[in-house]
Image (cartoon, helix red, strand yellow):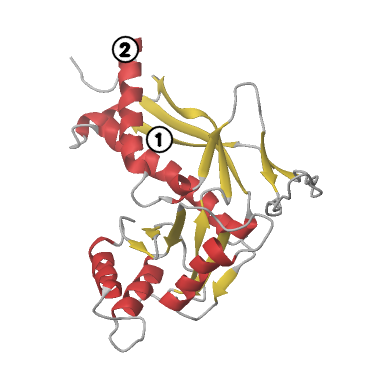
Amino acid sequence: MATGLTLSTSSNLQTTQQRLLAAATIAFEPAAPDPSMVRQVSLPAGHYQGIVATYARLTQASALTEGVDLAQVQQLATNTLTITPSEHGIIVTISKRAARRQFDSDLVSTAGEQMGVALREREAKDIITLYDGFSKSIVGSGSALDITYYRGAVAYMITDNDTDYGPAPMPVHAAFHAEQISDIILDLSDPGTTNAGTGREGIVANDLVKRWWRGSDRVYGIPIMHSGYIARDSDDDSKGAIFHENALREIEEGEVDVTEEGDNSLRVIEHGMFKSWGEGERADAHGVEIYSDTLAVV
């Protein structure tokens, strides 16, 4: 009896979909942390758009005098951000003959992993595009990111920010190209600079060298994440960002949808994976674009 992928029963279909989704979920995160660093909201059933309300900062509270009315009366000033999710997807076709001849013992899981990577890549790049929209941008084309610029961006975010939204609360994240992280490490560890040293900064640099891709180490209290899909432009520059999770907003419509369909005449199985999302900038002052040189050394 010939072996291969079949669609003979509903249980086979459900098992295959579960394997695809499990493999895709595992593959979602490592190289593309960007979507995980923004506030994600699910679109309620029956809606096709998400309305995100933003509120301007109130003036600080007044000191009161006993028996005297409070003269300062304030109102909430509301702005809205409308996000309409759009559908994204990928389809992979596997012939039954290829499945029989494949050395991979679990071709379905392999397909699911690769489909998950492709879907996550698109989602991450949609988020990364928003980094360029932050009004505050530092460093500049052709210049390397150093700890002074980094420290200034953090200070702007959490202390010096006197905009309508006020200082950004924690948590704040940093998403950088690998060469931008390398520049931070070099600046912290170079004994010829005033930012280096044998104290805590030297320890941080050493930790970053060991675990820079994980985001498990912090510089000035901010976890630095390597974003594998931040591109290098034609001038060898890249645009990362430091931002609070509420600076950007992603609205998801439903869960990841996995489909499977067979074509007996072509003798193939068509595997599909789909997800709907939309994104937008919610609080411009709670993000800083880091635009710097990322010239490749190899």
Mark 1, Cα crowd under 10 Å, few <14 / some 14-19 / many 20+, is some
Q: Residue at x 26, y 76 (%)?
A: 199
Using the image, tell me which numbered label, if any, was put on residue 104.
none
Mark 2, Cα crowd under 10 Å, few <14 / some 14-19 / many 20+, is few
Figure quadrant of residue 207? bottom left
Using the image, tell me which numbered label, if any, was put on residue 92.
1
Identify whether 253 is placed above or below 200.
above
Name the image quarter holding the N terminus. top left
Using the image, tell me which numbered label, if any, was put on residue 11.
2
Decide if residue 263 is in sight here. yes
Residue 222 lies, in percent from the top left, at 41, 60
Q: Residue at x 20, y 18 (%)?
A: 2
Q: Are marks 2 and 1 in contact (CB under 8 Å)?
A: no
Badge 2 amino acid: Ser
- Report the number of discs: 2
Q: Nearer the viewer, mark 2 or mark 1?
A: 2
Identify whether 191 is placed above or below 213.
below
Single out the residue that lies furthest toward the top: 9
Residue 273 lies, in percent from the top left, at 44, 32
**Dot 1 lies on which element?**
strand
Single out the residue that lies furthest toward the bottom: 192
Residue 232 or residue 260, whichever sits in front: 232
Residue 202 lies, in percent from the top left, at 26, 75
Name the image quarter holding the C terminus. bottom left
**Dot 2 lies on which element?**
helix
